[in-house]
Amino acid sequence: MEQKEIKGEAVPLAQARTWTLRDVMDLMEAWYPASTAEEWDRVGLVLGDPGQTVQRILLAVDPVAATARQAMDSGADLLLTHHPLYLRGTSFLPESDPKGSLVASLVRARVALFAAHTNADAAADGVAQALADLVGLRDTWPLAPAGVDSHGRPIGLGRGGTVEARTLGEFADHVARVLPAGPHGLFVTGDEAAPVRTVVVSGGSGDHFLADARRVGADVYLCADLRHHPASEHVEGGAPALLCGSHWATEWPWLPVLAAKLREAASAAGVSVEVEVSTMVTEPWTCHRRTLGGLQ
């Protein structure tokens, strides 16, 4: 397949005036190699014919009924998500099961499904970097280095960097303003008057990087899905302060980055492909209530 240089990256391009699903898969493999995914992960083509034509792509965080319906209603040929549909094997796909119903619906509508998960997390311009850029980190580096990509750029899970000097309260307010809105909001722990300079971030569940965030001397660690006991034990041990957003909100910022890459590759190839980013909030929670009950 022909290759063309796009912002310093040689990417494979279709020679025809249309893309196939295989062409999109080749681009994703060039940008987010499956070999960089965690061993437990399941990334790549979930369903679809690699030879089918792709003229419209919907990007979303989650492969759920709502985003599948959005893909079908919009006439998309491909639903490209961050999260895989299955992380463990399955032997049955009855339509009485939510995931079985989703698969059947997409197959009938000829909508392919592709996932880029921890391989997209680790990439030089992946999920972690998108979150770091969103909250204003500078001079970034991987929190858990995993080597370099084909262009010599560092890859790995999480990102660390510096921010303009400010207090924890000011930085928390900034993060709350720039994160995509959802019912979860942003939880904060720490002295809000304390100075903040070094910040580490990880999109999605972040318990496993608490020790790393302390090891690198961060003032703040931003992630999602912190469980009670690991977070409580961390707080007892001191810095860094913790900012806990929602899983969806800390991973969604990568989607516009990917959309821009796909649109640029399509333009360079001379093909007509529409790329839409779903703004549907696919958190399991739908609203937030502040509890006001007294203690007896």
Image: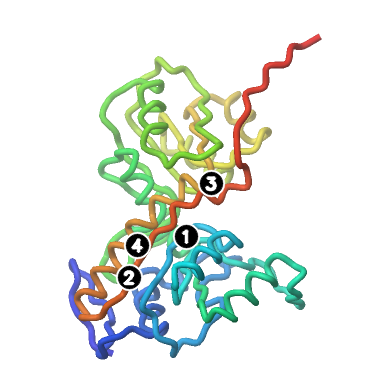
Q: Give the image location of residue 83, x and y in percent.
A: 54, 61
For residue 274, the mark is 2
Q: Give the image location of residue 109, x and y in percent.
A: 55, 79
Q: Residue at x 41, y 29 (%)?
A: 219
Q: Marks 3 and 2: which is nearer the front?
A: 2
Q: Closer to the N terminus: mark 3 or mark 2?
A: 3
Q: Residue at x 57, y 26 (%)?
A: 235
Q: Closer to the N terminus: mark 4 or mark 2?
A: 4
Q: Closer to the N terminus: mark 4 or mark 3?
A: 3
Q: Amino acid at mark 1?
A: Ala
Residue furthest out toward the top: 296
Q: Amino acid at mark 3?
A: His
For residue 258, the mark is 4
For residue 247, the mark is 3
Q: Residues within 10 Å of mark 3 (few under 14, many from 20)?
A: many
Residue furthest out toward the right: 296
Q: Give the image location of residue 136, x and y in percent.
A: 29, 38
Q: Residues within 10 Å of mark 4 (few under 14, many from 20)?
A: many
